[in-house]
Amino acid sequence: MTSSKQLLVTPAHLTARAFKRLLLSLTLLSVMSTHLQAEILNIAATESFEPYIIHDRKGWRGVDIEINRALMKRLGFEPEYQGVPWTRQLAYVEKGISGALLTVYCDDKRAFIEIVEEPFYEVRISLFARKDASLNISSLQELPTHARVGVVRENFFGKHLEAIAHIETAYTHDTPNLAAQLFHARIDFAYEEFIPFTYYAKKHGYAQQFKELLPVQRYQVCTAYSRTYFGERTAKLAQRTKTVIQQMKKEGVITRILDQYAPGK
């Protein structure tokens, strides 16, 4: 009768090829086990806001998506993104349908969300000019009389320009058109967020044609969890997430993602 000891398979009993197969099988089992253990987390996001969020036939990608994926992997979550308008994002998180908001301004005070108090990055709203511009100003009020300043119509910060009587506000429908107008000198200046403006300038071949003349406003961008969804776990999870984001920054993960889309951010 064969003893249990004789049935034990060790590396010494295996051919080199068989041993490699055994190691590969164990590795695959380990990966599958980790995947199965990951908690699926529904995350509310804007459906498409290039370059922060891009959702098309290729799937989900963009600055915010890539940062979030890297973060969720470290936290042990499997993210599922729910692309809906902002008001519905808030409703989903308040009701606990979604467990998190992809991004939110860090100073948001809504009672049903727990802000992770470590920003991903800074949103900078800036005045851009062509590279050959020699103007040096410290505020929008110092813009030259009759200067033509372009801004995307739907952006809330267009009202900053409307308050300045001696300039002309030129509205356009999107950021690529705004960059093109500045490149072709149809406007004197462009007023836009740094990341999308430099992203589209690079995408359309204008990257070396513009300069940031004046940073005007700055906002910190964070992520947030649903207190309804996570309950008593929320505060502890937010603190853990803060620590992980700090480590990602230390390793340069977030900077590398930003530089893919908006070099110089």
Image: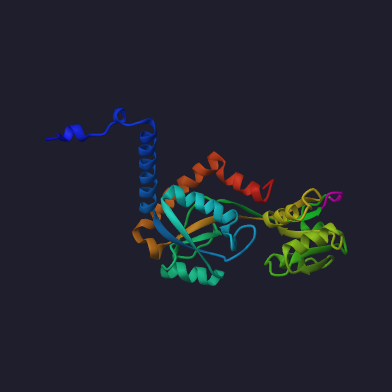
Q: Please give the range of residues in magenta.
A: 130-135
Q: In the image, is residue 183 part of the stretch drawn in magenta?
A: no
Vertical arrangement, residue 124 with respect to residue 163, above or below: above
Picture coordinates of residue 258 (x, y %)?
Answer: 62, 49
State the colouring used for the structure image: rainbow
Question: Image check: 160 left or right of 3?
Answer: right
Give the quarter of the image for residue 26: top left
Residue at 49% across, 42% down: 247
Residue at 79% across, 65% down: 164
- Considering the whole magenta stretch, tell me its main secondary structure: loop
Vertical arrangement, residue 16 with respect to residue 205, above or below: above
Residue 207 visible to an observer of this rendering: yes
Picture coordinates of residue 254 (x, y %)?
Answer: 57, 46
Residue 163 visible to an observer of this rendering: no
Q: How many marks?
A: 0
Question: Image check: 58 left or right of 235?
Answer: right
Position of the N terminus by quadrant: top left
Question: Image check: 179 left or right of 103?
Answer: right
Taking the view exactly as shown, the residue that stands out farthest to the top is 12
Picture coordinates of residue 244 (x, y %)?
Answer: 47, 46
Vertical arrangement, residue 246 with respect to residue 58, above or below: above
Picture coordinates of residue 242 (x, y %)?
Answer: 47, 48
Give the quarter of the image for residue 185: bottom right
| Nearest the eye: 88 or 110 | 88
Residue at 60% across, 56% down: 62
Q: In the image, is residue 131 part of the stretch drawn in magenta?
A: yes
Taking the view exactly as shown, the residue that stands out farthest to the left is 1
Vertical arrangement, residue 200 with respect to residue 168, above or below: above
